[in-house]
Amino acid sequence: MLFEALFAAGTTVLREFVRCTAVEVIRHTIEVIRHWTNSRSNRDSSSQQTNNSYSNKTAKNVTEELEIIDVEVVELERKERRDGHISRQGQERKQELELLRTDKFKEYQELKSEEIAENQCASPEDYETSALNSDKVHILQFHMGQVVLEKKCSCGKAMILQSQKRLDGSLYQLSDFFWACTGFYNNLPLQCRRTKSFTSMDVGFLHKSDIFEFQVSNQQLSTIFDDTSVKKATISRVKSHLKEKDDEILCPVHHLPMILREKNHHSGVALDMFFLACPHAGCQQIVKLKSPVQLAAYLKRREGRGIL
């Protein structure tokens, strides 16, 4: 058994999913993750010994550093718009900051991966597994927009989970999902438009056992959400977090925690009200919360409980 990717919220995507008891799957998976963690620790031990401050850092610390970097970038961009040009010194500094941003995001991915692996190894009893099938498509939707760790494009950049659009409002199918390089959002010549199909055969998820939305089918979750009282309660809870940061959803361009917003014009339909937006001035990157399970995932990250 191998794992294919880690989501920043702590879910492990498993390849070659072993068809045996849940306890055996978790035990086997934890062993794989433990070996992976040890190999990474041995590989990085020399570099960490030379930098004690790095070993004490958390992914949250790096996110805060990325926000500080962005403040300076925004100021340089604002000055360029005001003056109509940018000085050579300003251009060089902007390039330095972009390189620093890239390095910091790599550091974030390293630290976040280690934190997730350590938590899973330390408390395997808090996790369970779910097999991915046509009735469990919402498991994938639960992770839309989340930072993906240890899933790299051939160009070296991180990949994210994407899906085809279903404008008719029908339920998503496994074939709608794929991995996309985050380099897609870069300008030429750094742009990368590579994608990889999401192989659904024998794929499972190791996740926290308190994600109750995974214990029902996609259709059942939609039916539950159609209840008026459930919708009203969900809207009220989500609205209480407007303008708050979501540390698990980072902009693929600026690597900043995205901010919860409410659409200016909507008809009061819960699945057409909320989205996450990058706080960088002028950035158009958004993640729409357009399904019941995406709203559940947001509430799970913010409050520790979804809609069930």
Image (spheres, rainbow, N blue to C red):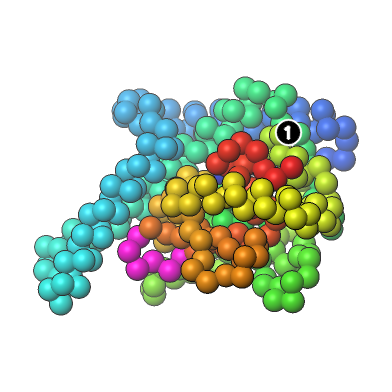
Dot 1 amino acid type: Ser
- Outermost residue, right direction? 20
Give the quadrant of residue 46: top left
Residue at 39% across, 75% down: 188
186 relative to 149, above or below = below
197 relative to 28, above or below = below
Number of numbered markers: 1
Give the quadrant of residue 129: top right
Residue at 45% across, 48% down: 244
Q: Is residue 243 left or right of residue 304?
A: left
Is the C terminus in the top left, top right, bottom left or bottom right quadrant? top right
Residue 30's x, y, as percent? Answer: 69, 29
Q: Nearer the viewer, residue 272 or 187?
A: 272
Residue 289 visible in the snapshot: yes
Residue at 72% across, 24% down: 125
Q: Is residue 217 magenta?
A: no
Q: Nearer the viewer, residue 307 or 266?
A: 266
Q: Nearer the viewer, residue 288 or 195?
A: 288
**Which secondary structure type mostly characterizes the magenta part of the structure?**
loop
Q: Is residue 16 left or right of residue 77?
A: right
Residue 233's x, y, as percent? Answer: 66, 48
> Which residues fall within the magenta stretch?
280-285
Q: Is residue 282 magenta?
A: yes
Q: Which residue is mark 1?
A: 209
Residue at 48% across, 59% down: 261
